[in-house]
């Protein structure tokens, strides 16, 4: 049909072109004939009649041709009618195609909408399937879990894994109960029975581990390590039965507190037996006599112990640096080696043992029992209270028997160091202990310093044997070494001397200055008195300069100023016999110059001449005499 349509269209276009061409030709012919007729001068009427005849003749011929071609024209008409029918059918077909195309577009939109709906349904079903599958997995109790919890040992890894899974199911069940899920009733009994069985086994295992702490010669930190590896056991009990969890925690607190109490009581008792036998006594004071007369077998005079350990520091400051974290002293090993220690060394070992065990214990209970802040401090106090009370009582007895002020101050510094160490480790539960112990030490230190001051104040310089001379006195040497020791310890823990210690040092310095004045007063010669004071000040400064590195030492600056004052007095005392007039002149004129009263200096003009002449004549002789006196 399409080919026929194209053929007919081509023929029609050809006929139209032929007719158009003929009309154009006729028009051209008519124009040419008319132009020829006009040029030839013919009569137009005649010419018109002639043309009319020709046209009639042509019409007759055309009619005749049409009549002759009637069959062909009829055939042409039939063909044209057939073409019209073909075109009508073609139009109908094209309209049908157009309608079908519109239907296809509608179907495509409908199918697209159906595809979106089906895809949404698929997604919803997948989500429901995932959640339902997870719900079923969380709800169903597998046989493996039942077998492991019922039959396996608590310490095995599989038991711990299944216990985690059981706890998850218990939490899931609680959440579904609020949602009123029907499936909860199907598994409630099974999971509850498993929970009670697991709790019973976990409780028994934990109590057994805690009871193993009580075995002799057992390092309690080993079973603690096993507890930490399985700390979920306590978490499981705490989540499902707080009463059982409290029972386990109370049993642990009771057991470990007894262990610590026994350990520290025994350790402190055995350790303090290793103290040196020649410890300082109430007679080892700054003002005590250096030697004792041989007055017989029943002499009551005190024999002062070695001053190197009573009034000097020696190497004891290492306790605040290198030996601060040294290993603990083992009593039986030290006893077998026949070792003896000073009080501060034993004190350090006891306190470091407490620091070490307390740090470990605080971190353990915070981790295992899942406590923090004030709750952790309270639990720690329940565990360590008896041990701390025992240690405070034991230390108090030894502190009250200690007459070594340097030892006491070393212990004060140790408390400060260990308190800082506990803060660095994040253990806040021991602050009260350090405060109480430090107060005990300061109270005893105050008492001993008071005894030292009273001994210095009570020195009878008139009865001293040998009598005082210009050389440094042994009491002053003791004082210098004693003060140096306290300052060295202080600068090892702080940049500045604390106010409590500074008050004691200032008070003792005042007592020593008064003693030095009394000692020098026993010398008949004023010059010797000055030399005595200068030499003793020089001794103090040399000892302080050797060990005290702090530039802010009040004692060093104070004694240096006192020494310079006495040196100036000594220089003036030595020069006055030989250059007295010159010194008097300078003393009189110097204030006038400083005040600007230069006019008043005129009255001294005659005196200056005499002084200069005397000085020029005698200065060499005077210098030689001064040298002889000094030497």
Image (cartoon, rainbow, N blue to C red):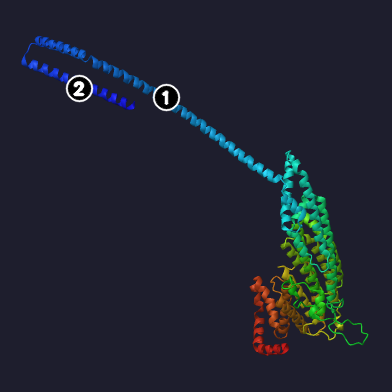
Which image quadrant is residue 393 in?
bottom right
Whether the residues at callouts 1 and 2 have beta carbons within 8 Å, the answer is: no
Q: Mark 2 points at which residue?
A: 21
Q: Distance between the residues labelled 1 and 2?
A: 40 Å
Name the residue at 86% across, 80% down: 460
For the residue pair 435 and 557, the one nearer the viewer reads as: 435
Name the residue at 58% across, 38% down: 122
Q: Is residue 530 left or right of residue 284?
A: left
For the residue pair 286 and 209, the one nearer the viewer reads as: 209
Q: Which of marks 1 and 2 is nearer the N terminus?
A: 2
Q: Is mark 1 on a helix, strand or loop?
A: helix
Horizontal and vertical percent for residue 227? 76, 60
Q: Residues within 10 Å of mark 2 (few under 14, many from 20)?
A: few
Q: Which residue lies furthest to the right in this view?
A: 298
Please, is residue 303 above or below residue 187 in the view? below
Q: What element carries label 2?
A: helix
Quadrant of the drawing holding the C terminus: bottom right
Horizontal and vertical percent for residue 244? 82, 52
Q: Mark 1 points at which residue?
A: 96
Q: Is residue 170 left or right of residue 41?
A: right
Q: Is residue 189 visible?
A: yes
Q: Is residue 371 visible?
A: no
Horizontal and vertical percent for residue 398? 85, 71
Quadrant of the drawing holding the N terminus: top left
Which image quadrant is residue 226 in?
bottom right
Please, is residue 164 above or below residue 73 in the view? below
Q: How crowded is mark 1: few (under 14 residues within 10 Å), some or many (20 or more)?
A: few
Q: In this view, does 332 lie to the left or right of 592?
A: right
Q: Which residue lies furthest to the front in this view?
A: 71
Q: Residue furthest left?
A: 40
Name the residue at 91% across, 87% down: 295
Please, is residue 326 above or below residue 536 in the view? above
């Amino acid at each position: 049909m399409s080919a026929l349509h194209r053929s007919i269209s081509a023929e029609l276009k050809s006929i139209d072109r032929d007719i158009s061409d003929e009309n154009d030709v006729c028009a051209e012919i008519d124009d040419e004939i008319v132009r020829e007729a006009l040029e030839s001068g013919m009569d137009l009427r005649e010419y018109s009649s002639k043309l009319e005849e020709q046209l009639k003749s042509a019409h007759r011929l055309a009619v005749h041709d049409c009549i002759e071609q009637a069959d062909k024209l009829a055939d042409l008409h039939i063909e044209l009618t057939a073409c019209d029918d073909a075109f009508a059918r073609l139009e109908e077909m094209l309209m049908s195609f157009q309608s079908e195309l519109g239907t296809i577009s509608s179907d495509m939109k409908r199918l697209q909408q159906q595809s979106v709906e089906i895809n949404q349904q698929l997604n919803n079903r997948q989500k429901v399937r995932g959640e339902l599958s997870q719900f079923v997995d969380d709800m169903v109790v597998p046989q493996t879990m039942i077998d492991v919890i019922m039959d396996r040992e608590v310490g095995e890894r599989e038991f711990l894994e299944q216990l985690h899974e059981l706890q998850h199911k218990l939490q899931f069940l609680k959440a579904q109960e609020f949602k009123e899920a029907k499936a909860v009733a199907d598994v409630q009994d099974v999971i509850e029975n498993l929970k009670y069985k697991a709790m019973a086994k976990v409780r028994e295992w934990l109590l057994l581990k805690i009871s193993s702490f009580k075995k002799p010669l057992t390092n309690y930190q080993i079973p603690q390590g096993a507890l930490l590896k399985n700390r979920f056991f306590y978490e499981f009990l705490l989540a499902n039965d707080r009463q059982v969890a409290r029972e386990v925690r109370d049993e642990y607190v009771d057991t470990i507190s007894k262990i610590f109490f026994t350990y520290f009581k025994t350790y402190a008792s055995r350790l303090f037996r290793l103290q040196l036998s020649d410890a300082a006594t109430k007679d080892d004071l700054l003002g005590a006599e250096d030697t004792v007369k041989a007055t017989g077998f029943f002499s009551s005079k005190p024999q002062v112990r070695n001053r190197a350990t009573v009034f000097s520091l020696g190497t004891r400051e290492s306790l605040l640096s290198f030996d601060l974290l040294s290993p603990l002293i083992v009593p039986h090993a030290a006893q077998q080696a026949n070792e003896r220690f000073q009080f501060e060394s034993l004190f350090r070992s006891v306190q470091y043992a407490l620091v070490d065990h307390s740090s470990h214990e605080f971190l353990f209970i915070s981790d295992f029992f899942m406590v923090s802040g004030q709750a952790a401090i309270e639990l720690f106090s329940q565990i360590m209270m008896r041990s701390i009370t025992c240690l405070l009582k034991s230390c108090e007895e030894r502190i009250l028997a200690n007459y070594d002020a340097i030892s006491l101050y070393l212990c004060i510094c140790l408390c400060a160091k260990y308190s800082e160490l506990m803060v660095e480790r994040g253990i806040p539960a021991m602050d009260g202990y350090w405060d109480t112990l430090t107060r005990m030490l300061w109270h005893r230190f105050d008492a001993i310093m008071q005894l030292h001051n009273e001994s210095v104040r009570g020195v009878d310089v008139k009865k001293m044997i040998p009598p005082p001379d210009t050389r440094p006195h042994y009491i002053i040497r003791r004082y210098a070494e004693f003060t140096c020791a306290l300052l060295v310890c202080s600068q090892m823990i702080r940049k500045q001397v604390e106010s409590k210690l500074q008050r004691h040092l200032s008070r003792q310095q005042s007592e020593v200055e008064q003693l030095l004045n009394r000692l020098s007063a026993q010398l008949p010669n004023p010059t010797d008195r000055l030399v005595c004071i200068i030499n003793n000040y020089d001794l103090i400064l040399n000892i302080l300069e050797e060990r005290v590195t702090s530039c802010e030492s009040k004692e060093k600056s104070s004694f240096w100023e006192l020494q310079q004052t006495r040196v100036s007095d000594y220089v003036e005392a030595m020069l006055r016999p030989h250059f007295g007039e010159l010194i008097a002149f300078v003393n009189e004129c110097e204030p006038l110059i400083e005040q600007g009263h230069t006019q008043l200096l005129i009255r001294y003009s005659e005196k200056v001449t005499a002084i200069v002449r005397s000085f020029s004549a005698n200065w060499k002789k005077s210098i030689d005499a001064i040298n002889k006196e000094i030497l």
